Image (spheres, rainbow, N blue to C red):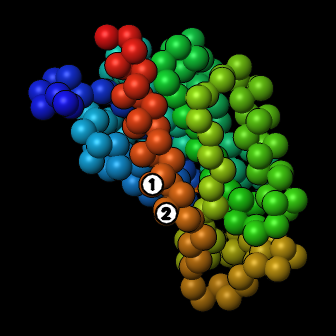
Amino acid sequence: MASTDPGDAPRTLVCYGSSEGQTRKIATRMASVLESAGHRVRLVDAAERPIDLDVGAYDGVLVGASIHAGRHQTAVREFVRAHTGVLNRVPSGFVSVSLTAAHEDPAERAPAEELLEGFLEETGWNPDATLTVAGALKYSQYGRFKRFLMRRIAGKAGGDTDTSRDYEYTDWEDVDAFAREFATLLESAAGSTG
Ligand SMILES: Cc1cc2nc3c(=O)[nH]c(=O)nc-3n(C[C@H](O)[C@H](O)[C@H](O)COP(=O)(O)O)c2cc1C
């Protein structure tokens, strides 16, 4: 039977980078799925670099980042590089958010997988679980230049170009399933070591 002592619950760190808020929303959602599974979760914005953060104190780590101009956030890359040893030791997962992942055609989605793989190669991290997930087009939050740029990019890709509204492409069922699977992975890892 599962333990009812909250002190025994797995401690999970969810660290994310987010430029316009969608990855924050995804990270928050994964944190709440993990909490529903009984985990003690700390949600951290990589850009804030909290000085008291002891990554080694967690039983598992989930990292989220989004792609801008072909790169994931520098703060997330620095976080992963600084903690590669811990991340390769405990159960860990990486979620990469982009518009490329919104394509239905797997061939058009492939660059999102390649950027995820490139990030892992660059950092030397071997997570147990990875997910590429579609983000959002938040025209209302972009300045004039960014709105123009994103409208052009979306137009070329056959996407949404009405800049009077925002679009969210995230598959929340996929996000929930990934977080639930990660919770199970962590629980079985904890069970096999203690
Ligand atoms: C300036 C800009 C550049 C972007 N560049 C890319 C890109 O190169 N490839 C891609 O797939 N998505 C790209 N996107 C889409 C973002 O990854 C997507 O909007 C995502 O939801 C952003 O997540 P965030 O709000 O957590 O930063 C770009 C978005 C912006 C605003």
Left or right side of 107 for 45: left
Q: Residue at x 36, y 19 (%)?
A: 190
**Please, what secondary structure does the residue beneath circle 1 have?**
helix
Asked if ligand 1 lies within 8 A of label 1, the reply is no
Which amino acid, mark 2? Trp
Q: Which mark is residue 39?
A: none
Q: Which residue is mark 2?
A: 172
Residue, far front = 1
Residue 101 at x, y percent in the picture: 71, 59
Left or right side of 47 for 142: right
Q: Quadrant of the C terminus?
A: top left
Residue, far left = 5
Q: Toward which corner of the image does residue 185 lie, by quadrant?
A: top left
Could one spot residue 135 in this view of the protein? yes
Above or below, comparing residue 173 to residue 23 in the picture:
below
**Please, what secondary structure does the residue beneath circle 2 have?**
helix
Q: Residue at x 57, y 12 (%)?
A: 85
Q: Toward which corner of the image does residue 40 lie, by quadrant?
A: top left
Q: Alpha-carbon distance for marks 1 and 2? A: 6 Å
Q: Toward which corner of the image does residue 78 lie, by quadrant?
A: top right
Which amino acid, mark 1? Asp
Asked if ligand 1 lies within 8 A of label 2, the reply is no
Residues tagged 1 and 2 counted as in contact (Cβ below 8 A): yes
Residue 157 at x, y percent in the picture: 84, 73
- The foreground one among 89 and 139 is 89
Q: Which mark is residue 176?
A: 1
Neighbours of disc 1 within 10 Å: few (<14), some (14-19), many (20+): some
Q: Residue at x 59, y 44 (%)?
A: 95
Could one spot residue 83 in this view of the protein? no
